[in-house]
Amino acid sequence: MSVGLEHYLGLSAVLFGIGLWIALAKRNAIIILMGIELMLSSVNLMLLAFSRYIRSETPIAGHIFVIFILTVAAAEASVALALAVSVYRTRGTVDIDQIDLLKS
Amino acid sequence: MSDAGVAIGFWGLGALAVGAALGILVTQNLLHAVLLLILSFIAIAGLFLTLTADFVAVAQVLIYAGAVGVLVLFTVMLTPSSARVNADTVFFGPGFIIGGLIAAGMAVVAFKTPWSIADRGGFTTTVGLIGDALTNRWALPFELASILLIAAMVGAIVLVRSAAPVDNLEADQPVADIPFDQTGEADGRALATAAPRGGEGH
């Protein structure tokens, strides 16, 4: 059974759904960030599958997109984790149920 | 790579990536969750290799599995007294429904759409093509990415920097500030008040 574009897109969709599930279901802010990273990675897989299979004049463009997503994801992860450490220093927790300063 | 090799790699690595990602939801230990995330990233890098994307696969291992994984691991270590247990919110059930619906919708679209498949096969090499594209057509975004990276680096350093002790550079500050600083030292508010002023001093 040969593997085609549809299989990669389906796997990417499953990984995206799991990443979204993690981001919604978990209470720790760090785990939520991990879910977001997983979603970004699944999008990378989708872009590379398109780059490999779809007819195009510049098929390498998908790789360029992935490289920029990697760059932005690394920057986002560093700033977000720094924010988590900063919140932990002032509040003593990274539990999103207890970070509710704006609520009351 | 032969078709059979690609099929074996796809199903094996796909099962590994999905299983490790589901393990993040199941495990009760935060450190195990981070290690499972790194395993999932490495499996996804293997999937990139089956798509003949060699450079991006190596970048995925270096940046995601290496740098981001270690960064997350350090953050887990730096927040010790927060819950080590990997607790769920009330959105565990709804999250499954929402995520499942989005995944099912995307999968249906992927299998129903008549894609215009090219018959050129995989890339034989990508590094030269990527280098050429980044220095010609996408040269401006490439340069902008460096600005983004340095802004993120400076931002992360400023955010996690602890309140610096009052040094000689700030000796010309009004004396009235000093007792306020010392009383504020006990609670966490000292960080919030001292950090911006330290930034101005340098």
Image (cartoon, grey):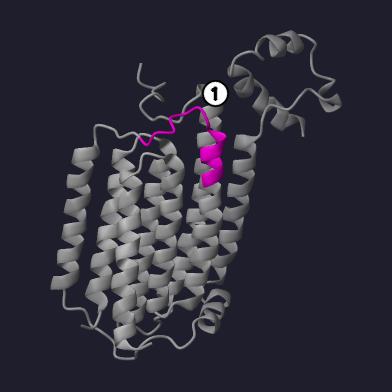
Location of the N terminus of chain B by quadrant is: bottom left
Residue B125: % across, % down: 49, 86
At 51% from the left edge and 52% from the top edge, which residue is drawn? B69
Please tell me how crowded label 1 is: few (under 14), some (14-19), or many (20+) other residues with Cα within 10 Å: some
Specify start and end residues of the magenta stretch as a single range.
B73-86
At 30% from the left edge and 51% from the top edge, which residue is drawn? B22
A89 with respect to B51 (left or right): right
Q: How many marks?
A: 1
Out of B35 and B57, give the one closest to the viewer: B35
Residue B66: % across, % down: 54, 58
Query: Residue A98's image quarter?
Result: top left
Q: In this view, does B13 lie above or below B115?
A: above
Residue B152: % across, % down: 58, 48
Q: Is residue B51 above or below residue A96?
A: below
Q: Is residue B98 covered in magenta?
A: no
**Which structural element holds mark 1?**
helix
Query: Residue B92's image quarter?
Result: top left
A97 with respect to B175 (left or right): left
Q: Is residue B60 above or below residue A24?
A: below
Q: Name the residue under label 1.
A: A90
Tag 1: residue type?
Thr
Q: Is residue B75 covered in magenta?
A: yes
Residue B198: % across, % down: 72, 28
Marked residue chain, label 1: A
Query: Residue A94's image quarter?
Result: top left
Q: Is residue A90 above or below residue B114?
A: above
Location of the C terminus of chain B by quadrant is: top right
Camera sees residue B90: yes
Camera sees residue A46: no
Q: Given the current orientation, which residue lies at the most extreme bottom position? A: B120
At 46% from the left edge and 43% from the top edge, which residue is drawn? B31
